[in-house]
Image: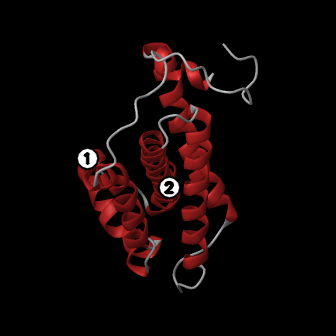
């Protein structure tokens, strides 16, 4: 096991992922989840998905499940629901990026795929916030980019820990 992350990967055939056939279907299957995640972000990064438009239908769903909530409490809860959506949504797109790089670069270490996934997530999150700065009912904040990246980081860390515990041979070259 290498003592630091900069050492070359172990060349044991039991720990190295095989190279897949690089057919058109491989590329579609590998990168379609990333493309769909980006498309979802583009759809959500519009005026119609601003807080002033999501409050009414999210409140209706909430009140159907949990009962009445006062206006004052709803303002705070709606804010946290939207921030939780950032965290979870970008966490999932971070996983899509991680999966795509994992399949695209099968000889790379997990942390290389992790870093590339974080870069992809941060790029999309930054673009999303920049785009929202031009919309009259949307705000733009670097804190949202940090929250988005925290979601991606957390979900990728969960995957790493899960794989470390259940499939250590696949991660042996990443340690």
Q: Mark 2, mark 1: which one is toward the viewer? A: 2
Q: Which image quarter: residue 128?
A: bottom right
Q: From the viewer's perspective, tell me whether residue 17 is left or right of residue 21.
A: right
Q: Residue at x 48, y 15 (%)?
A: 169
In the rendered structure, which disc, 2 or 1, sits on the residue that comes first in sequence?
1
Would you name the residue on which mark 2 appears?
86
Helix, strand or loop at disc 2?
A: helix
Position of the C terminus, as image quadrant, is top right
Helix, strand or loop at disc 1?
A: helix
Looking at the picture, does residue 37 appear above or below residue 11? below
Sort mark 1 into few (<14), some (14-19) or many (20+) by Cα contacts within 10 Å.
Answer: few
Looking at the picture, does residue 81 appear above or below residue 49? above
Q: From the viewer's perspective, tell me whether residue 6 is left or right of residue 171.
A: right
Numbered-mark total: 2
Q: Which mark is residue 65?
A: 1
Residue 44 at x, y percent in the picture: 40, 69
Residue 120 at x, y percent in the picture: 56, 56
């Amino acid at each position: 096991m290498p003592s630091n992350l900069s050492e070359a990967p172990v060349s044991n055939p039991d720990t190295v992922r095989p190279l897949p056939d690089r057919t058109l279907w491989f590329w579609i299957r590998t990168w379609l989840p990333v493309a769909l995640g980006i498309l979802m972000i583009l759809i959500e990064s519009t005026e119609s998905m601003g807080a002033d438009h999501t409050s009414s239908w999210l409140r209706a769903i909430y009140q159907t499940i949990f009962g009445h909530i006062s206006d004052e409490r709803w303002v705070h809860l709606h804010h946290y629901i939207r921030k939780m959506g950032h965290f979870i949504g970008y966490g999932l797109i971070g996983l899509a990026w991680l999966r795509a790089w994992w399949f695209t670069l099968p000889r790379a270490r997990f942390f290389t795929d992790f870093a590339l996934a974080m870069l992809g997530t941060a790029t999309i999150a930054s673009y999303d916030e920049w785009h929202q700065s031009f919309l009259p009912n949307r705000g733009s904040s670097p804190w949202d980019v940090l929250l988005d990246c925290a979601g991606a980081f957390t979900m990728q860390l969960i995957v790493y820990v899960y794989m470390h515990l259940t499939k250590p041979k696949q991660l042996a070259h990443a340690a």
